[in-house]
Amino acid sequence: MEHKCPHCRAVFKSKKHRSTHLRTHIGEKRYSCSKCLKQFTQRGGRDRHVRSVHLNIRPFKCVTCKLSFTQKSVLNNHLATHDNIRRYSCPLCPETFGQKINLSKHLESSKHAGKKIFNLGFKHLQFQVYGKNMNKIYRLIQMGGEKHSEKNANEKKKRKNAT
């Protein structure tokens, strides 16, 4: 049985995991760092903080450039800088990006300034666009701001080249 979060799209295998996750939405912070007193909603977050900030443990190493990282997810994001694949497409123009953060920065830029503000589900990201781009924005919201497939990116490039 799936246990869905009522606040976001997260799904969990057990009620216990969902309950732990729900603390992130309500701001309950049960765990504190003994060195700097920073507080966390989950024990794993506190433990990760201690290892990376206070002990400077960086077990995830890039085989290409030898940089090291505190979390595997950060290493995986970094690896995208080496493959030159542009996985993220702007819903408002033909630009594509290798990392989601660069798409977010692009969307926040003045290039897409306009009249209405839409929240696209990116963390703390809102930007302004003109009404004629409503369909593009709606499609991105439906996709949750997730990666476009390479096929979609290639189709977008073909449309751009055709104009």
Image (tube, rainbow, N blue to C red):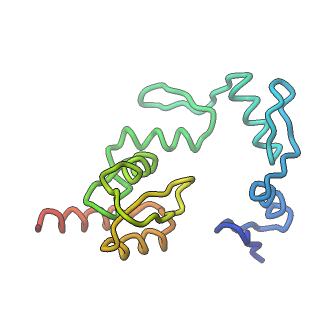
Quadrant for the N terminus, please: bottom right
As drawn, 36 above or below 115: above
Given residues 155 and 38, the one toward you in this image is: 38
Q: Residue at x 48, y 25 (%)?
A: 66
Q: How many marks?
A: 0
The answer to whether residue 24 is left or right of residue 79 is right
121 or 84, nearer to the observer: 121
For this view, does 108 lie left or right of residue 161? right
Q: At 73% from the left edge and 29% from the top edge, which residue is drawn? A: 51
- For residue 99, above or below residue 144: above
Question: Residue 84, located in which quarter of the rendered image?
Answer: top left
- Horizontal side of 36 relative to 127 (left or right) equals right
Query: Which percent across, then down, holds residue 97?
Result: 35, 50
Task: Tell me where residue 26 sits by quadrant.
Answer: bottom right
Q: Identify the residue at horizontal 54%, vertical 62% (top origin).
A: 121
Quadrant containing the C terminus is bottom left
* Residue 85 horizontal/vertical position (percent): 33, 49
Looking at this view, name the residue that lies furthest to the front. 115
**Residue 134 x, y percent position in the rendering:** 37, 74
Looking at the picture, does residue 11 appear above or below residue 54?
Answer: below
